[in-house]
């Protein structure tokens, strides 16, 4: 993946692409030139994604004045070359811990519990939920423990009356997004496998074929993870999201007992 500063452009080149990396990058520079934009090669970064501890990694040749990095930020998500999300989670936990200071000031100044709970969801829960289906499957036990520890402290400090867990939040986020991509109009619907040509008596959560996952990283990604998780059970919970399809914290409040509405949330 190349990241340039020409209107924050990103170039993704698969390893099995028929087009060479150099040709793709030349097309980006030509497009920028036609649209009267300058591509700053000194700020252009390149990252090569690969499996952890591979036997052999063949890096493409470096282009002129470009730098190869081991991690990069894309849409406020820190991506590492072998897909651990330690840097992203640590940055997020640091940001949430800083917001705890503001919440403590509001609590000490006498903000009512219900309003404090609303601010907590807007500042902390919404930050954790941002693009959660993208990286929740790659969390290690240590990272899950750190995030749950942060959520336990939020209840201890009186910011919320419910003990949230990352596992529950990830399940709700996965089910909500998976429910949306089942619609043919969704932009991710084309990534789903073909539907089964036979029916079974056992209720299934979807009608798609299960993908063949030879790599653990592939199985942990969002679509294979949801397909396998809902393969042997009933369909995921359906929620009415016509008013605001990105307010997943409403669903969390409904299932956890908190009476709150978040001001912003993204699913990536």
Image: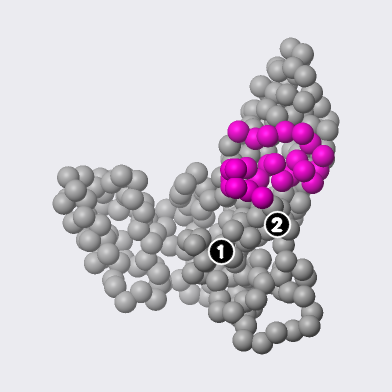
Could you tell whether 244 is left or right of 72 in the image? Answer: right
Q: Residue 256: x percent and y percent?
A: 81, 43
Q: Nearer the viewer, residue 267 or 92?
A: 267
- CA gap, disc 2 to disc 1? 13 Å
Secondary structure beneath dot 2 equals loop
Q: Position of residue 229 (x, y in %)?
A: 72, 68
> Which residue bears the numbered disc 2?
238
Q: Is residue 254 magenta?
A: yes
Point out the residue furthest to the bottom here: 198
Residue drawn 62% across the image and 61% down it: 178
Using the image as rendered, state which of residue 245 and residue 34 is in the foreground: 245
Q: Residue under label 1, please give it.
A: 183
Magenta-drawn segment: 240-263
Whether residue 84 can be seen here: no
Residue 221, position as x, y percentages in the image: 60, 64
- Would you say residue 33 sits in the magenta stretch? no
Q: Position of residue 247 (x, y in %)?
A: 62, 42
Is 144 placed left or right of 78 in the picture? right
Quick check: 5 left or right of 195?
A: left
* Nearest to N terminus: mark 2 or mark 1: 1
Q: Residues within 10 Å of mark 1 (few under 14, many from 20)?
A: few
**Magenta span main SS:** loop
Q: Residue at x 58, y 37 (%)?
A: 264
């Amino acid at each position: 993946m190349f990241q340039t500063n020409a209107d924050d452009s990103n170039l993704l080149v698969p390893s099995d692409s028929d087009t060479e990396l150099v040709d793709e990058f030349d097309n980006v520079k030509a497009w920028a030139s036609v649209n009267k934009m300058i591509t700053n090669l000194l700020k252009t970064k390149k990252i090569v994604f690969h499996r952890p501890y591979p036997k052999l990694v063949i890096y493409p040749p470096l282009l002129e004045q470009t730098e190869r990095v081991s991690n990069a930020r894309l849409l406020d998500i820190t991506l590492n070359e072998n897909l651990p999300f330690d840097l992203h989670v640590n940055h997020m936990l640091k940001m949430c811990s800083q917001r705890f200071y503001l919440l403590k000031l509001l609590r000490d100044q006498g903000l009512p519990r219900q309003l404090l709970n609303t601010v907590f969801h807007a500042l902390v829960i919404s930050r954790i939920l941002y693009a959660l289906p993208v990286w929740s499957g790659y969390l290690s036990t240590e990272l899950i423990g750190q995030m749950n520890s942060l959520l336990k402290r939020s209840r201890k400090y009186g910011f919320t009356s419910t003990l949230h867990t990352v596992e529950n939040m990830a399940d709700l986020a996965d089910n909500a997004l998976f429910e949306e991509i089942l619609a043919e109009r969704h932009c991710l619907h084309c990534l789903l496998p073909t539907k089964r040509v036979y029916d079974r008596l056992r209720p299934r959560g979807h009608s798609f074929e299960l993908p063949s996952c030879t790599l653990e990283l592939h199985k942990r990604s969002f679509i294979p993870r949801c397909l396998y998780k809902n393969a042997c059970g009933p369909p995921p919970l359906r929620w009415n999201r016509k008013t605001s399809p990105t307010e997943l914290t409403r669903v969390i409040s409904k299932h956890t007992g908190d009476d709150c509405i978040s001001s912003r949330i993204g699913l990536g």
